Image (tube, grey):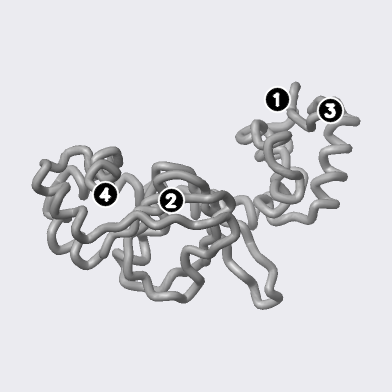
Amino acid sequence: MYETLKAIPLFSGLSDSELEKLSNISRLKKYKSGEILFYEKETPIYMYILKNGEVKVFKTNIKGTRIFLHDFKPISLVAELPNFENIPYPASAEFTKNSEIVQIDFKKLESDFFKNPDISHKIIRSLSQKLRIISEVLHQEISLNAEAKVAKFILEKDSYFGNIKDVQIAAMLNITPETLSRTLAKFKKQDLIKQDKARRIIHKDINNLNELLE
C-alpha cells in the first residue's frame, strides 16, 4: 500500500512516516467492469482514488433512464465533494473497465492529513475541476440539441470513435443510438466529418462544427 500511495500525485509531498500512517487507513480494492462503486443517495464513508481502469458517474431519472454525467480515468479523485459536504452521493458510479480503487477512511484522512497545505491545495484544485464538469454537463443538457452535442463530442473527443461502441458514445451524450447514427450520417453527407472503415474520425471541419454550438 505504501508504494501505491507514494505514486499518487496527491500524496507526493508526504514524508515516509506520513505515507506509512496513511497506509494504515487505506486499502487497494479491485473491481470488474459493470460493478458499482456507490449508488445515488448512499452515504459516503471513503475517499476514492482511481488508480487504473475507468468509472462513469450517472444519475437515474424517475423513468429509470440513466443520465451520463462524467467518466473518470486514472489517476483521479472520484466524487469527493459529498465527503466534504457530508451529504449522500447525488449520483451513482459504475466501472466500465476492470479497475483498481484506493479506498481511504475519510474521517481519519480529514483529521490527520488535511492540515497539510499541499494536500489541501490539490484537493481544492480537484473540487474546482468537478465544478467545471458539473457546469459543462448542465450546459450540454440545457443548451445543446442532439446535433450540437455530437459536434461538441467530435471536437473534443474524436479519438473515442473506433475505440468504443457507438452505443456507448450515445449513452455518454444522453441521446439514443439511432439519433447518433442519423447525426453522423448527416455530418458525413455535409462533409463535416469523414470516418474510415473502423469508424475512426479521419477528418473534421472544425469551423463548421463549432458553428453548430452557437
Q: What residue is pinned by disc 4?
A: 1
Which of disc 3 and disc 4 is earlier in sequence? Answer: 4
Q: Nearer the viewer, mark 2 or mark 3?
A: 2
- The amino acid beneath tag 4 is Met
Q: Nearer the viewer, mark 4 or mark 3?
A: 4
Q: CA distance from mark 2 to mark 3?
A: 34 Å
Quarter holding residue 11: top left
Furthest-right residue in view?
A: 189
The amino acid beneath tag 2 is Glu
- To which residue does mark 2 refer? 100
Lower sequence index among marks 3 and 1? 3
Residue at the spot of label 1: 207
Please state if 6 lies on the left or on the right of 185 as rendered: left
Q: Nearer the viewer, mark 2 or mark 1?
A: 2
Q: Secondary structure at mark 2?
A: strand
Q: Amino acid at mark 1?
A: Asn
Instruction: Report helix, strand or loop for mark 3.
Output: loop
Q: Secondary structure at mark 4?
A: loop
Badge 4 or badge 2: first in the primary sequence? 4
Q: Is residue 145 visible?
A: no
Find residue 148 and report its horizontal and vertical position in percent: 72, 43
The amino acid type of the residue labelled 3 equals Lys
Reading the image, the residue beneath label 3 is 197
The C terminus appears in which quarter of the rendering? top right
Mark 1 to mark 4: distance in Å?
A: 48 Å
- The residue mark sitting in front, 3 or 1, is 3
Q: Are marks 4 and 3 in contact (CB under 8 Å)?
A: no
Residue 73 % position (x, y): 48, 44
Could you tell me residue 112's position as x and y percent?
A: 13, 59
